Image (spheres, rainbow, N blue to C red):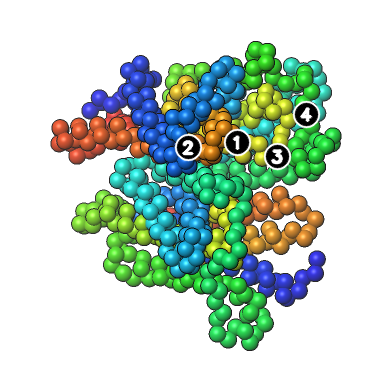
Amino acid sequence: MVKRRKTLEAGGVSKVLQSLLQPLGAVLISLVLGAIIIAVSGEDVLNAYGIMLHGGFGNGNYLAATISRATPIIMGGLAVCVAWKAGYEAMGGEGQMILGALASALVALYVPGNGTVRIILAIAAAMLVGALYSAISGWLYQRFGVNFIISTLMMNYIANNVASYLTTYVVKDPEALDLNSVQTAKLPESVRLGKLAGGLPIHWGFVLAVLAVAAVFIVINYTAFGYKARMGGINERFARYGGINSKKMLFSIMLLSGALAGMGGAFEVLGSKYRYIDQMIFTAGFAWSGMVAALLANFNPFGTMFAAIMLAGLSNGGSAMQRSTEVPVEAVSVIEGIIMLLMSVKLLSVLRVRFKKRKAGDGNSPQNGGTCVEEMV
Amino acid sequence: MNVSLEYLLSVLNSTVRYMTPILLVTLCAGICSKVNVFNIALEGTLLAAAFFGFLAQYYFRNIFLSVLIAMLVGMLITLLMAFFVVKLKGHPMIVGMAINTIATGLTTLLLSVIFHTKGLISEPGMEGLTKVVLPGVQNSPVLESIFSSLTVVDYLAFLMAFAVFVFLYKTKTGFRLRAIGINEEAAGSLGIHVQKYQIIACTISGSMIGLAGCLLSLGSVTLFVQKISAARGYIALAADSLCMSHPLGAIASSALFGFTTALSYVLQKTPVRQQLLNCIPWIATIVAVAVYNVDALRKKNKPKKKTPKK
């Protein structure tokens, strides 16, 4: 009866190993399919993949660039981890990240004070703006029953347009030489997140992101709040029956998730671009990559971090491949999509369930451990 | 700003032209959600259909064949979506987003491999969808400006809405599909092959996305540009939730989005900036869904209050 109660407990070591099998399989299959695309584009597959691998992880410099690119992706992934683990399928990371990035740039530029204080304020502002923007979709859901998917998708576009408006007309860099460059002024040296090692593009934002990963891991797995959130994610009615205030839970989760996404935007501005450039988050697709990373890792924060670094390496490698071969960088997003598609079905567990079903002749097939609470009742 | 009758009529005309692709996609979304498949892959499917319709026209210069190929692409991708969700029990959101990612990547990839561009591609001499002039319309200037430059697929979209309505509500198969949507187990116990019905219904409804794709790339203008679908797939999802998957309601809800889009273009002549105008359809979507939901909730709660306490 209670053999699957494990789902509510924190993951063990063997579970981690098991959960690695599927992502690796998915990555392998998608690389094979990617090879076909490269071959069709008329390039030598091994050569193209070699360039891609080198461009992503080849030497210290490239690796540092990959990690720098991964930083906002990690934060976007964490935002997805928190929300989806609690059962709220929100996809608003992009909008929250855009507004967070813009807010951090503005605070860093225009708030008086010394460097460190301004950096802290800028990150705090990004978290606040992201959290509030995320809470709007929570409110729309709670008050009006607006589907999360619809409200968050729409709000991504609204955020991007509003940020675009502000950078074009209100806070545009007055010293921009090129009239077409829609961006804020460049941050002074004192309010930038420092580089970890001289010359390499990797910055302190990554360290903060790793700390955030650890914090989210602990909160989800080892606190009462995380327990309640996970319980709500598995079975909201049961959680409510158990005395959990679902309204309070919804808003805490949305605020936390939005704050994490907003922070990702701040890291990109303060550590990497040193200004907000119109469409910078939208074009780079940090939030989407973050979502892919979280899905690949099955919403495990540490797994999300590694997946984010892998995805960032793929896309940096893809750009390198585009520079020196005929294969366009979009091949990478096709590979990314195929990975996601293969991950969606949890092929291993489907197979295992079928096997078990045949063995036991049991009609009730558990799907990805989603119904354990019902069994406990 | 000078508001003349002609101007208003042209707004009406653009409303119709913006709404028809959304209407077709909303109808597909409606059928998919009637059989419990939450299809968020509409966006990618629409993009791919628009691209392959354009590509077919580029190579074959035959509008009939192009439409057919676009419909086929729409059906194939929706089949993929339905198969992964229904048969393999994949998470619909993840499957859908995966398909959207692949579609965006693949169309841009093919665009740069075939046409060596990543921006806009338009080839002279390509034939768009046949424009239809209704009999009698030419005699009246008012009607003429409302119905100007509408293609055969624009009219077909409205016909499809009625056809889907008749199919869902007046035929045995349609009744079974709706039964699946209400309760899969109960429908299965009546001997309905639930999964088969779900997959086939979704696949066939995918052909309507193909038609919508043709409207985008081969409609009033014959061109393809990266991300030409411009989130219409997501808007259609919202439109579907607004009309509760009712095909005739889909006409009204897609008209709302057609109108707000037209409005955002009309208001460009005012001092309000473009970027803010772009937000109008998105905000309207959220507000419409919220208002509608509140209304629906109120109606749902009313009879409860009237029932006397025992």
Give me the C-alpha separation between circle 2 and circle 1.
25 Å
Q: Chain of mark 2?
A: A
- Dividing the picture into quadrants, the one containing residue A315 is top right
The residue where tag 4 is placed is A186
Give me the C-alpha separation between circle 3 and circle 1.
11 Å
Q: Residue at x 15, y 33 (%)?
A: A360
Q: Are marks 2 and 3 in contact (CB under 8 Å)?
A: no
Q: Residue at x 66, y 36 (%)?
A: A280
The residue where tag 2 is placed is A43
Query: What x and y, as percent, mark residue A294?
Result: 47, 30
Q: Under tag 4, what secondary structure?
A: loop
- Sequence-first tag of 2 and 1: 2
- Sequence-first tag of 3 and 4: 4
Classify A18 as above or below B79.
above
Q: Are marks 2 and 1 in contact (CB under 8 Å)?
A: no
Classify A51 as above or below A362.
above
Q: Under tag 1, what secondary structure?
A: helix
Nearer the observer, B210 or A79? B210
